[in-house]
C-alpha cells in the first residue's frame, strides 16, 4: 500500500526544459515511477529528438514537443496538442530556466528582463494553461523548480535570484488559489549538482569546488539522480496534503551558517 502512494502509472507529466541536465534527471525518475513523459525543449528539433530517443532507450514512454515557454500563443497551442495527442496533463514540472552571471550595476535591463521572463513569467504562462484542465478534473500536481537563490543572494546572479525568489512566492500563491480544486503546487530547490556544466570546476583545488564541498554538510556535490525522490513524492498521492512548500535538495547547505576556517 505504501509503495502505491508513489506509483505514477497512468499519469502524464509535462517537464519543461528536460532535454538535458537536472530536468532530464527528474523526468527519468518520473518515467521510472510509471509516468508517460512529455518532454519540452526550445533550442532545436534535433536536440529534442535526441533526448526523446534517449528516454525511450531507457524503456520510458516519452514524447517531445518543441515550443518556447515564454510565448503564450505557442504554449496554448502546444498544451492543446499534447492533451489531444498524448492525454491529459496530470503533472507539470516547470523546470526551464536560464542564468546570466553579470554584476547588477553592469547588467542591461534587457538581460534582467530575459532572465525574469524565462525563470518567473514562463512558469506562470505554462501553469495558467495546464491548470485549467486540472481544475476541470479536480486533480493535479505542479512542481516549480526553484533554487537556493530563492532564499540567498550571491554575487553576479541578481536577476536569477530575483526571479527564483519570485517563483517561491508564485508557488505559494498558486497553492493558495488552486488547493480548493485538489491541486497541489510545490517547489524543489536544488543545491549544487554534478552535471556536465559544472564538470570543469569540480576538480580538487578549484576555489569554487573547494567552497561547495566545504560549505555543504554532506561534503560533496549532489548527483542529479538525488532529485528524483523529491520529484516523485511531489507528483504522487504521497503528497496529497502537501501544498505551497519548497523542498530544498541541497545536502544541507541552507541548514547551516557554515564552519569557521579554523575548523576541520
Image (cartoon, rainbow, N blue to C red):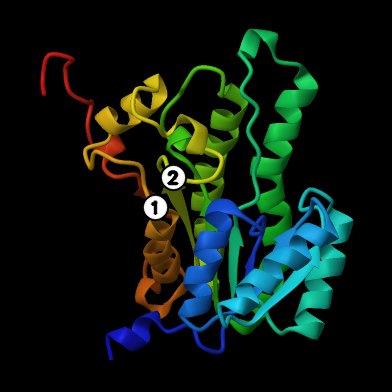
Q: Is residue 78 left or right of residue 36?
A: right
Total marks shown come to 2
Give the quarter of the image for residue 174: bottom right
In this rendering, the answer to whether 5 lies above or below 107 is: below
Residue 238 tag number: none
**Closer to the camera in the image, 194 or 71:** 194
Disc 1 packing (10 Å; few <14; some 14–19; many ≥20): few
Residue at 68 percent of width and 52 percent of height: 124
Quadrant of the image containing the N terminus = bottom left
In three-dimensional space, the C-alpha distance between marks 2 and 1, rounded to whole angstroms, equals: 6 Å
Taking the view exactly as shown, the residue that stands out farthest to the front is 204
Q: In the picture, residue 2 is in which quadrant?
A: bottom left
Q: Position of residue 182 (x, y in %)?
A: 50, 75
Q: Residue at x 51, y 43 (%)?
A: 169
- Asked if the residues shown at circle 2 and circle 1 are in contact, with their CB atoms under 8 angstroms apart, the answer is yes
Q: Which mark, by number, is residue 194?
A: 2
Report helix, strand or loop for mark 2: loop
Tag 1 secondary structure:
loop
Residue 182 visible? The answer is: no
Which residue is under mark 1?
223
Pick whichever of labels 2 and 1 is earlier in the sequence: 2
* Of 165 and 249, the residue lying toward us: 249
Q: Is residue 120 visible?
A: yes
**Label 2 Cα crowd, 10 Å radius (few <14 / some 14-19 / many 20+):** some
Which quadrant: the C terminus?
Answer: top left
Name the residue at the left extreme. Answer: 263
Residue 72: percent from left, percent from top: 83, 54
| Foreground of the two, 198 or 185 | 198
Front in this rendered view, residue 149 or 127:
149
Whole-percent x, y for residue 104 in the image: 62, 14
Amino acid at each position: 500500500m505504501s509503495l502505491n502512494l508513489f506509483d505514477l502509472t497512468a499519469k502524464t507529466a509535462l517537464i519543461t526544459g528536460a532535454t538535458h541536465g537536472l530536468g532530464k534527471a527528474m523526468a527519468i525518475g518520473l518515467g521510472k515511477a510509471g509516468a508517460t513523459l512529455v518532454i519540452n525543449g526550445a533550442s532545436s528539433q534535433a536536440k529534442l529528438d535526441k533526448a526523446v530517443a534517449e528516454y525511450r532507450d531507457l524503456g520510458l514512454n516519452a514524447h517531445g514537443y518543441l515550443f518556447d515557454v515564454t510565448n503564450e500563443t505557442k504554449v496554448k497551442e502546444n498544451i492543446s496538442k499534447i492533451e489531444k495527442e498524448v492525454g491529459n496533463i496530470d503533472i507539470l514540472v516547470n523546470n526551464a530556466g536560464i542564468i546570466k552571471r553579470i554584476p547588477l550595476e553592469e547588467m542591461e535591463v534587457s538581460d534582467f528582463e530575459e532572465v525574469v521572463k524565462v525563470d518567473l513569467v514562463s512558469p506562470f504562462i505554462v501553469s495558467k494553461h495546464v491548470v485549467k484542465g486540472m481544475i476541470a478534473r479536480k486533480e493535479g500536481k505542479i512542481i516549480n523548480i526553484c533554487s537556493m537563490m530563492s532564499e540567498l543572494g550571491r554575487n553576479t546572479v541578481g536577476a536569477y535570484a530575483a526571479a527564483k525568489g519570485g517563483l517561491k512566492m508564485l508557488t505559494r500563491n498558486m497553492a493558495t488559489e488552486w488547493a480548493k480544486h485538489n491541486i497541489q503546487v510545490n517547489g524543489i530547490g536544488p543545491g549544487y549538482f554534478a552535471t556536465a556544466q559544472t564538470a570543469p570546476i569540480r576538480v580538487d583545488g578549484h576555489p569554487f569546488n573547494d567552497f561547495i564541498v566545504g560549505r555543504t554538510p554532506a561534503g560533496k556535490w549532489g548527483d542529479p539522480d538525488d532529485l528524483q525522490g523529491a520529484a516523485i513524492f511531489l507528483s504522487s498521492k504521497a503528497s496529497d496534503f502537501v501544498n505551497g512548500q519548497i523542498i530544498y535538495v541541497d545536502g544541507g547547505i541552507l541548514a547551516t551558517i557554515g564552519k569557521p576556517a579554523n575548523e576541520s
